[in-house]
Image (tube, coloured by chain):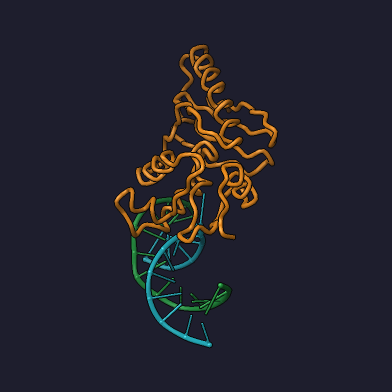
Chain colours: A orange, B green, C cyan
Amino acid sequence: MKNNFIELPIFTRDGIFLAHYSEKGLAGIDWPNGRAELPLGQAAQQRRPTESKDISAKIKNWHRTTETALKKILAGKKSKLPPLDWTGKTEFQKSVWRQMLKISAGKTKSYGEIASAIGKPKAVRAVGGACGANPVPVLVPCHRVLAANKKLGGFSGGLDWKRSLLAREGIKPKN
DNA sequence: AGGCTCATGACTC
DNA sequence: GAGTCATGAGCCT
């Protein structure tokens, strides 16, 4: 069976990332070291590729944006992002990710701050859950979210990644 | 300071 | 519904 998900590699000095595109935009990114596939929007799988050529052209363009964005962010810089496809995700998660997109390079926020920002100051733990469910790590800067006392917290791609990414932005967490 | 417990909200099975 | 958390605050040594 073929889905209309398209996987394209991105070569960086940190390894080969794998970008997943739906017809709506960037739907996910895989970590270089062959991590388990991330949950992606299922709705996208059920759609038919109606205009393959057009989609390919779009995706090619998005991929260019994604590639530069990824490399820039890996270098600790800010960058323009391609359209993101969050199909199949909950409103709560999207709100959380939207907040994360507002964190500029070199800055951090706590899970609690994110929770307050979306009007649910007590949903701190749920925010953590949403971070882990983020299908597009690095571009959606889930690594800039720390625990309340500037401690590391966790990271789905491995804490080494989080430490490294933060270090490139000049951030030094407490532990 | 470090460790333990518990409230809490969203998500998954 | 019960169990799982990438939290946070509070209370103990």
User: At which x and y percent is residue A127?
Assistant: 42, 52
Q: Which residue is drawn at 57% across and 45% down?
A: A170
In the rendered image, which quarter is residue A85 located in?
top left
- Residue A3 shows up from this direction: no
User: At which x and y percent is residue A65?
Assistant: 53, 23
User: At which x and y percent is residue A162?
Assistant: 59, 48
- Residue A131 shows up from this direction: yes
Identify whether A38 is placed above or below C4: above
Left or right of A63 on screen, residue A117: left
In the rendered image, which quarter is residue A100 located in?
top left
Q: Which residue is drawn at 32% across and 48% down?
A: A118
Q: Which residue is drawn at 64% across and 28% down?
A: A10
Identify whether A68 is placed above or below B2: above
Q: How many marks?
A: 0
User: At which x and y percent is residue A84?
Assistant: 45, 31
Left or right of A163 on screen, residue A47: left
